[in-house]
Amino acid sequence: MVFNKKSTSTLIASSLLLLTAPRGVLSIVPAGIDDGDLPPEPPTVTIDMSLPPEEHFKPAVQAVLKEDAYEDSFGPLFREFNTSVFGKEKLQDEDYEMLADAAEKFYPTQARELKGISEEFANQGHYVSFPYLSAWMYAIEMEHIEYPEPSSSTSVGGEKLDNNECTALFVADSEGNVVQGRNMDRPPAYTPYARPVTLNFDIINNENGIPDFKASGFYWLAAAFVTANIPGH
């Protein structure tokens, strides 16, 4: 079910800086970049939640491929995860199918969003299956299976702490510009691959009293967001 040949590398980016302004601008910056030397702002995509779920994330696929070719964006990022997470877990076709069944059973709306992402890849001439994208929904769980040990020896009261988690901070300057910093605490191999797939989002027309909000990141591939904010809150 994995759509292309696997290659060698490791998992998640370490010491990323996610830079945001009040209107939601975000970029992924490798740690150590020169002070004041900010990368280009990624595209902003509007996700209209009043549309059918299959349509929600199609504009995100389009936005990435408008800026970068598949082999300069999605292709290397997928191969990285195939090796580091899915490869180490030795996932087979039946495993991807099982994860797709679980997505449809427990997260039916998100499953439909993933099917829409898969459809848009096909429209753009690339095969990325719904079962493969379903595995991205569970990538973090697999990651914690693969990396169960604390990543440092920090201890409090003789008890070793698990620093194998994301951490974040927010600071603002006198002009109201907000900077969000995050350490994903993983090997930095996929940093350059995640960056072209990172987008800003305006999520509108939500239901059940959820206000419009902004989000940033590349886990939209799992029809999900890691970073989100509600302007004015």
Image (cartoon, rainbow, N blue to C red):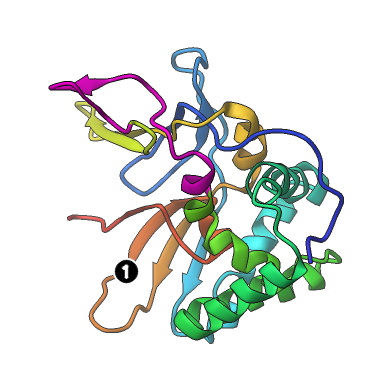
Quarter of the image for the N terminus: give it. bottom right
**Residue farthest to the front, as pictured:** 158
Residue located at (23% from left, 31% from top): 172
**Residue farthest to the left, as pictured:** 157
Range of residues picked out in magenta: 143-162
Residue located at (35% from left, 49% from top): 23
Residue located at (65% from left, 70% from top): 117
- Which residue is tagged 1? 212
Asked whether residue 177 appears in the rendered view, the answer is no
Specify the principal SS of the magenta part: loop
Q: Which one is nearer the viewer's eye here, 40 or 30? A: 30
Assign a secondary structure to mark 1. Answer: loop
Label 1 environment density (alpha carbons within 10 Å; few <14, some 14–19, many ≥20): some
Q: Is residue 144 magenta?
A: yes
Residue 35 coordinates in the image, percent (x, y): 44, 13
Quarter of the image for the C terminus: give it. bottom left
Q: Is residue 22 left or right of residue 12?
A: left
Residue 94 coordinates in the image, percent (x, y): 72, 72
Q: Which one is nearer the viewer's eye here, 209 or 102? A: 102
Q: Decide: is 158 above or below 76.
A: above
Q: Is residue 77 left or right of residue 223?
A: right
The amino acid at mark 1 is Asp
Q: Which one is nearer the viewer's eye here, 27 or 107? A: 107
